[in-house]
């Protein structure tokens, strides 16, 4: 029987890693199927926005959140409704527990609802984990989108989206700092190092996640909308309503739990549901005339709609930038409804996932100097950023083709705990809070600003003991410096390798030149005959040089011969012969 895991709250040091159930099921498939293997491939740095209640100024007539993106935990009907009266007040000042309840009772529970559905298609390699996580960001108002333009996507026919633009908005004629959209997805990186450890009776895998010094945030992050038999408009239920058919009368609790279940850390085990988009029911409260008119006092209608999770109808389609939905929620104070409804600004897109295909990015395709995200993150456009969470992805590889058939979300690393601000933004409501952020500085040669880097190591232990099968994750807090040293050593090795390749190229060129000279020398015709003639010429020169060594003797001989000839001529003349 499927069961939603009971999780811990984010810890203060070392980070907390939450694994999705779909990943554990894929690991099981990989063990039993020789044609499939799982390879950790990508990681994504997130800047999860501040946690704020709906309408942080407390005035429902003022809609500041229309431009600002916050994680509004009480915008999810199940997290603000009457079913949380027993825990809402208790956790009002412990936002660490409230955040963990959303991870458990909304994200992980929705995934378990889908996995346990009788119509779930187990043959598909793409899981629903990533789409559920981004659905939660959308439902809480943390992330919004617009269509990607032709300077962001590489082809006109591609249907891609980007986050809303980061810019200050005007409100009542004045610029206010919190009226600003802050992008959530900051950085896309590669998981380059995976180490399998087997020592001292323990076996586990180590994932090294490194954000190097020389990079900044990814200048453009594209998103795509994905729909299939397991997550879509009509997936697993009618009209986008995801129903779980395996409940045994405990619909108000997360999958596999009931009123007898005790959470080790005191977290609520009541499920956080959505409301149908047609507003027929909102968490079991019937909407009589419009979403703002709720019959919140009719207990007979409580959970009348049953366990419902809903999807939107915007899948794989062009999305108008102004198609921003305003859903309504009702807040509860001290366990009782406050009698008012509040608007929550949210995007209508659904099925959202990150597009990791570099060929879809205009700035990568049209720059001959870059071809990967690592190079893209090192361009002048990449700036410093902050982050507080990391998504870890893995590829499902088909052994027959050695190609990835899907890229799925394995889990999320929350780097620190949730810190509650000292002053509450709204009386009798959830206070402001945030997850501690870590600044990533990119070096600036002009200003002389130094850069920094981050390294994380995640140890994955796979427990197959009877009754406790699962995946255990440990995040070490002591290895950031060692990872930095290791990263720098790897960088130096890359430089040395580059120099070695350059020297090798030079040696090859010299070798080829010498080879050509040798070939020309040994290919001369009649080389022996030419050598013989040269030797004869040397002998003649040697013989002649002996006669030429005494030039005075030769001159005397010529003079003597001349005198003898003159004497002979005179005798012949005297005798009248000539």
Image (spheres, rainbow, N blue to C red):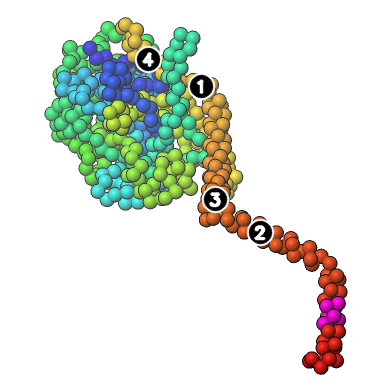
The percent coordinates of residue 37 (x first, y second) are 32, 24
Q: Secondary structure at mark 1?
A: loop
Residue at point 51%, 21% (across, down):
477
Which residue: 82% across, 88% down? 572
Give the residue at mark 1: 477
Separation of marks 2 and 1 at Cα, in angstroms: 88 Å
Specify the segment rendered in magenta. 559-566
Disc number lying in front (3 or 2): 2
Query: Which residue is denoted by mark 4 in the rendering?
Result: 462
Q: Is residue 564 magenta?
A: yes
Residue on which disc 2 sits = 536
The disc, 3 or 2, on the residue closer to the chain's N-terminal end is 3
- State the separation of the CA atoms marked 3 and 4: 68 Å
Work out whether 277 lies above or below 532.
above
Q: Are marks 4 and 1 in contact (CB under 8 Å)?
A: no
Instruction: Tell me the CA gap for discs 2 and 4.
Output: 89 Å
Relative depth, front residue between 230 and 558? 558
Image quadrant where residue 551 sits: bottom right
- Mark closest to the chain's N terminus, 2 or 4: 4
Residue 271 versus residue 404 in the image, above or below: above
Q: Mark 3: which secondary structure?
A: helix
Between tags 2 and 1, which lies in front?
A: 2
Sequence-first tag of 3 and 4:
4
Mark closer to the observer (3, 4):
3
Q: How many numbered discs? A: 4
Q: In the drawing, what numbered circle is on residue 465?
A: none
- Pick whichever of labels 2 and 1 is earlier in the sequence: 1
Q: Is residue 273 visible?
A: yes
Q: Secondary structure at mark 2?
A: helix
Q: Position of residue 114 (x, y in %)?
A: 22, 23
Q: Nearer the observer, disc 3 or disc 1?
A: 3
């Amino acid at each position: 029987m499927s069961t939603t895991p009971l999780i811990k709250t984010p810890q203060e040091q070392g980070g907390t890693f939450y694994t999705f159930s779909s990943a554990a099921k894929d690991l099981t498939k990989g063990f039993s199927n020789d044609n499939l293997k799982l390879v950790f491939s990508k990681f994504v740095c997130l800047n999860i926005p501040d946690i704020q209640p709906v309408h942080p100024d407390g005035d429902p007539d003022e809609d500041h959140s229309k431009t600002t993106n916050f994680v509004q935990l009480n915008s999810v009907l199940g997290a603000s409704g009457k079913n949380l009266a027993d825990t809402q007040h208790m956790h009002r000042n412990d936002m660490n527990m409230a955040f963990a309840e959303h991870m458990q009772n909304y994200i992980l529970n929705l995934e378990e609802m889908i996995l346990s559905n009788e119509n779930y298609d187990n043959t598909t390699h793409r899981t629903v984990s990533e789409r559920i996580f981004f659905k939660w960001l959308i439902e809480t108002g943390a992330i919004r989108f617009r269509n990607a333009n032709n300077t962001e996507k590489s082809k006109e026919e591609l249907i891609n989206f980007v986050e809303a633009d980061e810019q200050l908005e005007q409100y009542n004629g004045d610029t206010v700092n919190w009226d600003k959209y802050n992008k959530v997805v900051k950085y896309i990186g590669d998981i380059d190092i995976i180490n399998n450890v087997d020592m001292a009776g323990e076996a586990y895998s180590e994932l090294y996640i490194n954000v190097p010094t020389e990079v900044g945030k990814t200048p453009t992050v594209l998103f795509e909308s994905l729909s299939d038999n397991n997550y879509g408009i009509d997936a697993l239920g009618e009209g986008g309503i995801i129903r779980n058919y395996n409940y045994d009368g405990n619909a108000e609790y997360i999958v596999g739990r009931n009123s007898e279940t005790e959470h080790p850390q005191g977290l609520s085990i009541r499920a956080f549901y959505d409301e149908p988009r047609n507003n027929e029911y909102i968490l079991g409260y019937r909407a009589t005339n419009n979403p703002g008119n709720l019959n919140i006092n009719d207990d007979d209608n409580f959970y009348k709609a049953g366990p419902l999770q809903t999807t939107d109808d915007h899948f794989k389609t062009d999305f108008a930038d102004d198609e921003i939905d305003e859903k309504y929620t009702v807040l509860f104070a001290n366990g009782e409804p406050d009698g008012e409804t509040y608007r929550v600004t949210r995007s209508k897109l659904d099925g959202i996932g990150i597009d990791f295909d570099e060929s879809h990015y205009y700035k990568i395709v049209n720059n001959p100097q870059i071809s990967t995200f690592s190079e893209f993150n090192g361009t002048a456009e990449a700036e410093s950023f902050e982050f507080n969470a990391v998504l870890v992805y893995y590829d499902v590889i088909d052994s027959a083709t050695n190609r990835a058939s899907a890229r799925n979300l394995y889990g999320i690393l929350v780097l620190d705990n949730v810190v509650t601000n000292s002053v509450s933004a709204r009386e009798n409501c959830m206070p402001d809070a945030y997850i501690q952020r870590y600044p990533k500085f990119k070096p600036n040669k002009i200003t002389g600003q130094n850069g920094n880097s981050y390294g994380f190591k995640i140890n994955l232990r796979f427990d197959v003991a009877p009754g406790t099968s699962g995946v255990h994750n440990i995040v070490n807090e002591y290895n950031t410096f060692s990872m930095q040293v290791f990263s720098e050593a790897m960088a130096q090795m890359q430089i040395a390798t580059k120099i070695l390749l350059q020297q090798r190229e030079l040696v090859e060129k010299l070798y080829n030149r010498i080879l050509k000279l040798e070939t020309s020398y040994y290919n001369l015709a009649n080389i022996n005959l030419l050598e013989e003639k040269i030797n004869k010429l040397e002998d003649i020169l040697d013989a002649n040089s002996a006669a030429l060594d005494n030039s005075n003797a030769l001159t005397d001989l010529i003079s003597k011969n001349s005198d003898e000839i003159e004497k002979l001529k005179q005798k012949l003349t005297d005798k009248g012969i000539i």
